[in-house]
Image (cartoon, rainbow, N blue to C red):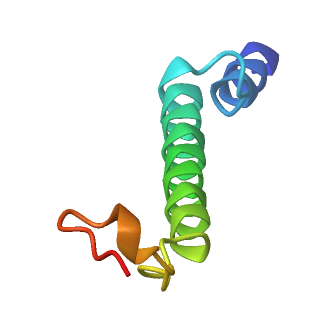
Amino acid sequence: MQQNIIENGEKKDFGRNWVTSSRFLFHIQLFAFLAFVLGGCYGLYSTHYKGKPKVEVPESTLYTPKYK
């Protein structure tokens, strides 16, 4: 009777039951991967390219330069 109680207790132990431990570790890895991807996407979105700036170009440096 005492052995039966110990065996049932061992089935619930994280280190002894590889099915539940591997399932738990899989979910932890999946959550960490999704958090990493979403964090990277947010980082790229928050520093995205704002647009083409207005730059003053001297007329003498154009493809067809204009001289005075």
Q: Nearer the viewer, residue 20 or 29?
A: 29
Q: Nearer the viewer, residue 18 or 6?
A: 18
Q: Nearer the viewer, residue 3 or 56?
A: 56
Q: How many marks?
A: 0
Which residue is situated farthest in the front direction here? 68
| Image quadrant occupied by the N terminus | top right
User: In the displayed structure, does residue 64 sit left or right of residue 14?
Assistant: left
Residue 11 % position (x, y): 63, 26
> Residue visible at 26% across and 68% down?
65
Which residue is situated farthest in the left direction here? 64
> Residue visible at 48% across and 45% down?
30
User: In the displayed structure, does residue 44 sit left or right of residue 68?
Assistant: right
| Image quadrant occupied by the C terminus | bottom left
Position above or below: 66 against 24: below
Q: Quadrant of residue 60?
A: bottom left
Residue 9 % position (x, y): 75, 29
Q: Nearer the viewer, residue 57 or 59?
A: 59
User: In the displayed structure, does residue 43 sit left or right of residue 30?
Assistant: right
Residue 48 % position (x, y): 51, 71
Q: Quadrant of residue 59?
A: bottom left
> Residue visible at 47% across and 26% down?
19
Q: Quadrant of residue 40?
A: bottom right
